[in-house]
Image (cartoon, rainbow, N blue to C red):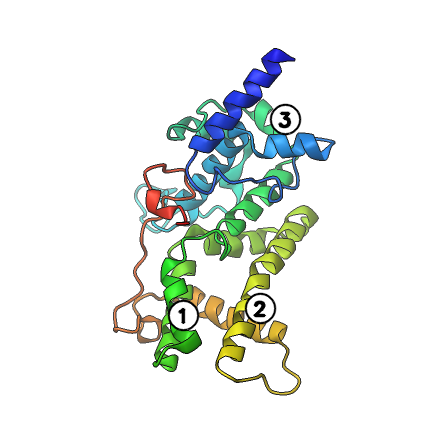
Amino acid sequence: MPGESEGVTRGQGLKRQLPYPYDQDLSGVLRQLNRRTPASRGRLANDPVTAAYLAAGMRLIETHLGPQAVRTPVDPDDENSIERPLLSFLSQRSVAAEVGNNPAPFPQRGSVSTLRSAWSHHSDYVADLLRFGLWAYHPNHCDATEAADILAQILDGPHFVEAIHRMGFWNVLTLVDRPRFRLELIATAAAEGDEVIQKAMTETYQEILEPWKDICAELLSARGTQLRAGITIETFVDLITAVMEGVALHALAAPDTPSSTAPEGEPWQEQPSSRLSGDASSESAKPTD
């Protein structure tokens, strides 16, 4: 139908105007959409209205989980009586209302009914939001110019140990400075008994680690080294991930302690993250060709 075709064309045009990574093809990322056919799910995944709900959810995550989370006191006379929600801030009503705070060019009119039209169950929305939040920091999608430079130094640079140290520090900062790690921690605690969210976390975690297996294998080969007998590349990546996430967790809990300092001796610094909250002004977040 002509009217429907024109609407699709307008939607595609608006989609291209959205900030990264909302302008990317999300048909392989969002898997819980309330549509029967792959084609209709693909169209809905790349609808600007769907992106609007994702941006609203990511902004709520940053507001409630950090960096620089907003803490609301339950008792105005008691500064320690802050509200400590888990995922309650991502209620359908809250997300629909938050759409109104979307920056241009995102759609800014949200409702529970349109949200439910895209995701029939709240767990489906949270699962896809989690997939999106984790996918957006995938090595193939994040702005990893600095990391690429460090990897080059690890491959054939003269200061191998220093480069390894820098890579570890960069990885921890990536976790500490962005809301994805906080979302992962909270979702892990909140996912007990929720098979939809648990499945989303398991799938996405595996997908995030997969490219690092190739990266680590290339680094070992370039340096003429190999893992000891009985240790696979999968185990090696799991060990590195466990160490990085453990250090990041410690850095969040005690950022000023000596064991949580940068190579130069400075404490971890949290930088405001605007990319996934839908701030179109953050052009540096887009990857360079």
Residues tagged 1 and 3 counted as in contact (Cβ below 8 A): no
Asked which secondary structure carries label 2, the reply is helix
Residue 213: mark in rendering: 2
Sequence-earlier tag: 2 or 1: 1
Quarter of the figure with residue 230: bottom right
The picture places residue 243, in percent across and down from the top left corner, at 49, 72
Q: Residue at image x 61%, y 41%?
A: 30
Q: What amino acid type should be assigned to the residue bearing mark 2?
A: Lys
Upstream in sequence: badge 3 or badge 2: 3
Q: Residue furthest right?
A: 36
How far apart are the alpha carbons under marks 2 and 1?
16 Å
Going by the image, does 273 lie left or right of 95? left
Q: CA distance from mark 1 to mark 3?
A: 46 Å
Label drawn at residue 117? 3
Q: Position of residue 162 (x, y in %)?
A: 35, 78
Q: Front-most of 104 and 252?
A: 104
- For the residues bearing labels 3 and 2, Cβ distance under 8 angstroms: no
Residue 90 shows up from this direction: yes
| SS category of the residue bearing label 3 | helix
| C-alpha distance separating marks 3 and 2 | 38 Å
**Front tag of 3 and 2:** 2
- Which residue occupies 43% across, 41% down? 20
The amino acid beneath tag 1 is Ala
Judge by depth and name the residue closer to the eye, 99 or 174. 174
Q: Nearer the viewer, residue 92 or 102?
A: 102
Residue type at mark 3? Ser
Q: Is residue 237 left or right of residue 279?
A: right
- As drawn, the residue found furthest toward the bottom would be 229
Label 1 or label 3, whichever lies nearer to me, is: 1
Up the image or down, 245 lies above or below 190; here it is below
Tell me if residue 183 comes above or below residue 256 in the rendering. above
* Residue hosting label 1: 152
